[in-house]
Amino acid sequence: MIQRMSSLFVRTLREDPADAEVPSHKLLVRAGYVRRIAPGIFSWLPLGYQVFRNVEAIVREEMNQAGFQEVHFPALLPRDAYETTGRWSEYGDNLFRLEDRKGNDYLLGPTHEEMFTLMVKGEFSSYRDLPLSIYQIQTKYRDEARPRAGILRGREFVMKDSYSFDLDEVGLEDSYNKHREAYISTFDRMKLDYVIVTAMAGAMGGSRSEEFLANSPHGEDTYVRCDCGFAANVEALEIPMTSFDPELDLDAHFPAAHAEQTPNTPTIDSLVDLSNQREDLARSDRPWDASDTLKNILMIVKDADGNQSPLAIGLPGDREIETRRLEAALYPRVARPFEEADFAKYPTLIKGYIGPRALGINSPGGIEFLTDPRVVRGTRWITGANEKGQHVYDLVCGRDFESDGVIDVAEVFDGDPCAKCGGNVSIARGIEIGHIFQLGTKYAESLGLKVLDENGDLVTVTMGSYGIGVSRAVGVIAEAHHDEKGLVWPREVAPADIYVVAAGKSEETAAKAEEFASAWDAMGLRVILDDRVGVSPGVKFNDSELIGVPTIVVIGKGLEKGVIEVKDRATGERIDIALDQAVVAVHQICTN
RNA sequence: CGGGGCGUAGCGUAGUGGCUAGCGCGCCUGCUUUGGGAGCAGGAGACCGGGAGUUCGAAUCUCCCCGCCCCGACCA
């Protein structure tokens, strides 16, 4: 079926929409692929919907290829199951809730672990039925606090979510790996540049978890990568303990700790400056650096039962605590910074001058004191002296203080050592396009999904959960494949193979364009024919490039020389092809 | 939820108390034009986000509300 620009339901815009920021959003709107309906909610127009379905088809094919079976749940779900697993409340404001006419609570599904678990529970009851992986491609709803970047982060979006059900860990590992491989094939077909990073599994109660992140400067996720192949989401990154010599004679090696008056040093920078300026404090070997200072940050930690306790975190002064890493490290406990009222309860803590000697579970205050992995035996610090206006120098870990344990929550810098190879990591941004993780028994446990094993014993099924953002993938592909003129779709997801421009007003031009379009259409190629009359060639050229079909054929002036012009959208390369060879040649270009 | 910006025609915008709200794109009619977003002429299209107030007079000033965008917090 030839798509004719003369009747296609599309209107391209000459200017960027005012509310769009990222390239994919601007271009998808300008090229007439999507239109915004409400914040984070979009409609698909014909061209956009074709791309969407092409992307969806890739996902579906790869899932089926892997042996997973497709099912379909409602998006509108009753409260019950989500109440059982606690997510009705856990999900908080992100859950779209509604009531039916009788006042019963419903929700628009943000993800479907509960429903899948219950469905399997209702059908299967024997180990003979496992393993099983089932999936759906479904519209999901999350009332995001801040939808943004057009289609990349909506409140309504389409996601492929699958769930694996296995008898044991070994089976789960196998199902997990199958999904992992299927995801690699899927994203390769989408022509995406992505990395697989280790991610936090803790928040979902599972063990192993990886994210597929498409590289993009507009990505919301920060991850670290290394040339050795190591990659991890910042929240999942583990900094190795700095190595140290347990035998080193600390007394002989370091000067004794000494407290000094350090007025007017409210910040780390001012403390470092003062230390370098004063001859009595300066180091002999090199100037002091912010990383030589140890800052101690006080938090109040609340556990799942609501019990609060103070926690001190000691880390090098050049780094801040990274909130996401802190949350991951403490989960399920949550932390908040110390406030004035908290300081009032611990008179030994002098705000701004807190030092290790006032901390630790064995200290008078009894405050738990955890330190960064860089704070190890034999490291020497400038830190608070627990007296107003004083800092202590040459305070050596292992000699002058001990911590109660390690906490790895400091921000990561570009160039930090790699945990795997010791090289330098770099920091990059990515957009999450897929996430796979091993749920374990969390849902099966709470919803009672058990099967009989070969001994006749009831065992709780172990599960995995795997998602691909289908509608997001459309935006991510657009992010990755565009230039200043417009979109540049990879062929498999493009809304057509060929955009035929009838350039010129002669009847011959129109007739030839029709003829070729029909021939390619008959050969199974997907054709857009720009048959608009009274529209200048320039407009057609611009639209063809904006819309981003991979092959553009221009039929016009060349007819005099007996040729048509074929342009590669991605490279810009143009070639003339003789009329009598054109049908076959273009078909070949589009299918090899 | 905190900070910043903004709401005027389908889209992009001008308009800081005064006459009939202006322009570009797009749209309609006619003529001309047809290889890189054409020209001329004529048209249609706006409860100026909503409400209340100040004023002889409000798109413009005040208050309240609603909505949108960006940064941050948040994000299975």
Image (tube, helix red, strand yellow):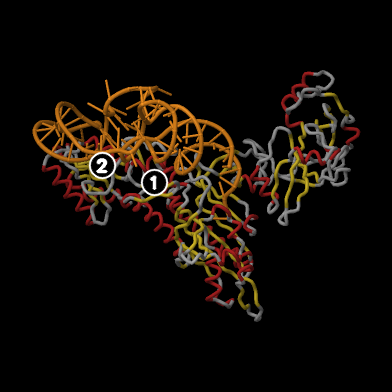
Please state if A345 lies on the left or on the right of B59 as rendered. right
Residue situated furthest bottom in the rendering = A456
Nearer to the camera, A540 or A523: A540
Report whether mark 1 lies on the same chain as mark 2. Answer: yes
The image shows residue A565 at horizontal and vertical percentages of 23, 40
Check disc 1 and report the residue beneath it.
Answer: A36
- Where on the picture, by quarter, is residue A281? top right
The mark nearer the N terminus, 1 or 2, is 1
Amino acid at pointer 1: Arg
Nearer to the camera, A213 or A299: A299
- Residue at the spot 56% in from the left edge and 66% down from the top edge: A81
Q: How crowded is mark 1: few (under 14 residues within 10 Å), some or many (20 or more)?
A: few
Please state if A7 lies on the left or on the right of A80 as rendered. left
Number of numbered labels in the structure image: 2
Taking A8 as reference, is A16 above or below it?
above
Q: Mark 2 lies on which chain?
A: A
The image shows residue A61 at horizontal and vertical percentages of 42, 61
Residue A200 showing in the rendered view: yes
Q: Mark 1 lies on which chain?
A: A
Nearer to the camera, A37 or A68: A37
Check disc 2 and report the residue beneath it.
Answer: A566
Taking A335 as reference, is A76 above or below it?
below
The image shows residue A125 at horizontal and vertical percentages of 57, 77
Amino acid at pointer 2: Val
Query: Cβ–Cβ below 8 Å for labels 1 and 2?
Result: no
Q: Which of marks 1 and 2 is in front?
A: 1
Please state if A115 lies on the left or on the right of A375 as rendered. left
Q: How far apart are marks 1 and 2 (CA)?
A: 34 Å
- The secondary element bearing badge 1 is classed as strand
- Residue at the spot 84% in from the left edge and 33% down from the top edge: A386
